[in-house]
Amino acid sequence: MISQPSNLDPGMPIAGKSTAAPYVLSNTRTTSFERFLLFLAPVLLPLQEQIPTVAGMSVMFLVFAVLAAYVILNRSRTLGKIWCHPIFFAAYAFIGVSVLLEFSSPQSRYGEIFRFGQMISGMVCVAVLCRDRSALTAGLYGCIAAALWVSLLLYLTSYGTLQGMNVDSFHEASKARAQVFQDKAIEGNINGLAHACSQGAIIAFALTLSESLKSRRNLWLGITAVCLVASFLPMSRGAAVISLVSFVAILYTYGAKHGKVLIILAILGFGIYIIVPDAVWSRMAFSTESRSGKLEGRAWIYTTALRRLPEYVVAGVGAGNFHEKWGFEKGFAREFGGQQVVYGAHNAFLQIAIFWGTLGLSGFLLIIWSVYRSIPFRCARDGLALALMGIAISLGLQLTQSHVFSDKWYAIGIGMLIGARQWIWPTGVVSVVEATQGPLRDRL
């Protein structure tokens, strides 16, 4: 087999060979700088609202700008091969349809579409850099590192307070949550912090199951427990459901009949039950009414959206029209801070349907289907593949918990999935040789 220098871009012809049919090595080894970028992006992501902006640009915008500049200048040939991936073609179609529908609606606003396009650009850059197992490992370790430092912050700022609280109902727990996090040590969405911890727990759990060495398996199990407990501290119901379903999916893929798995589950479950404060469990229910007789937030949004379904089901009402006029008139607004504010649908699929109807939603579902088809088969044989599968499921579930469909976590997680499928497992099947290589044996 002809080797190719690691500093060459995939697709460049080998010296001495005909340029008529260039030799392409899909898994050309990545550089240390590329692996550093893949590690750095998720580590800094929870800090994007904490670090001051530079000329109006957030730290994550600058990080992805560096990624884009590097890819364009040094990996242009690889970029030419990855941009036509089926997921990106589906994204281009969705952008085209949503732009046309938004243009046809009153008070057009293209901010959501523009941010979605930025997310796709970041996703392309991550996919270009994630060309071998070392790069994929760096990206996954970056997610775990982010989860660990966010977990430490949550333990230091909220665990003791929650442990001392005595609440007996959902409404009391919601008040306790507001009290604990009213002076957050880190800016940003509380549910987003829980999601970051959940991502780290999911990845560490997949590596726990696939690791053969007991000492390393215990290390990953400890990290799983730390991140999983921390994901409960923000009292986010969505993060709890996402973690549970993702863990079940990983177990189902791996095979839960192994004795080792049962022992790991028993230790993990018992530890979570003992460590998580009782106040957290009081908010893990879905309440339909508040003490004032009004519907609880999500129930109010869902029932209002269902009642207005005939008005947006075909082509939507437009993003700008929803936020500026239609949302106020149709019951999606509530008072906040002394003024009426239109609230999102707490569900990306529902929000897209309201914006651009069945036409826009169909384009978005095509993206989801393409992502599903990119998950490699036989994931249970490989810890990295198993972790990617868990990430894909958790990000898909996140879409059902939030109306935001252009988050940077999607750019990182799905970007790694696309890159791995394109370069590491181009056939879509994890080979036996790769499966026998433990994730910790890959050198960064």
Image (cartoon, rainbow, N blue to C red):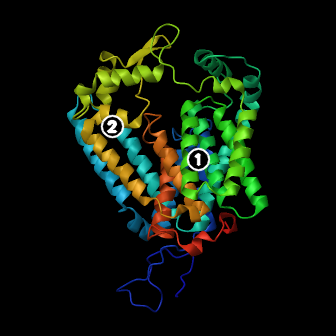
- Distance CA(mark 2)–CA(mark 1): 37 Å
Question: Which one is earlier in the sequence, the residue at label 2 or at label 1?
Answer: 2
Q: Nearer the viewer, residue 161 or 116?
A: 161
Instruction: State which quarter of the image contains the C terminus.
Output: bottom right
Q: Which residue is mark 2?
A: 110
Task: Name the residue type under label 1.
Answer: Phe
The answer to whether 282 is drawn above or below residue 66 in the figure is above
| Residue 82 seen from this side | yes
Query: Marks 2 and 1: CB-CB under 8 Å?
Result: no
Q: Extreme right residue here?
A: 215
Residue sticking out furthest to the top: 292
10 Å crowding of disc 2: few (<14), some (14-19), many (20+):
some
The crowd level at tag 1 (other Cα within 10 Å; few <14, some 14-19, many 20+) is many
Question: Which labelled disc corresponds to residue 32?
Answer: none
Numbered tag placed on residue 247 in the rendering: 1
Residue name at image x 47 percent, y 86 percent: 14
Nearer-the-camera pick, 18 or 282: 282
Horizontally, residue 228 falls left or right of residue 127, namely: right
**Image coords of residue 30 (percent x, y):** 57, 69
- Residue 100, compared with residue 188, is above or below; it is below
Taking depth in this image into account, of 191 and 276 the one nearest to the observer is 276
Query: Residue 322 location, x and y as percent?
Result: 32, 26
Percent coordinates x, y for residue 23 in the rendering: 43, 83
Q: Which amino acid type corresponds to the residue marked 2 in the rendered image?
A: Tyr
Query: Where, by quadrant of the figure, is residue 382 drawn?
Result: bottom right
What residue do we see at 61% from left, 36% from top?
193
Element class at badge 1: helix
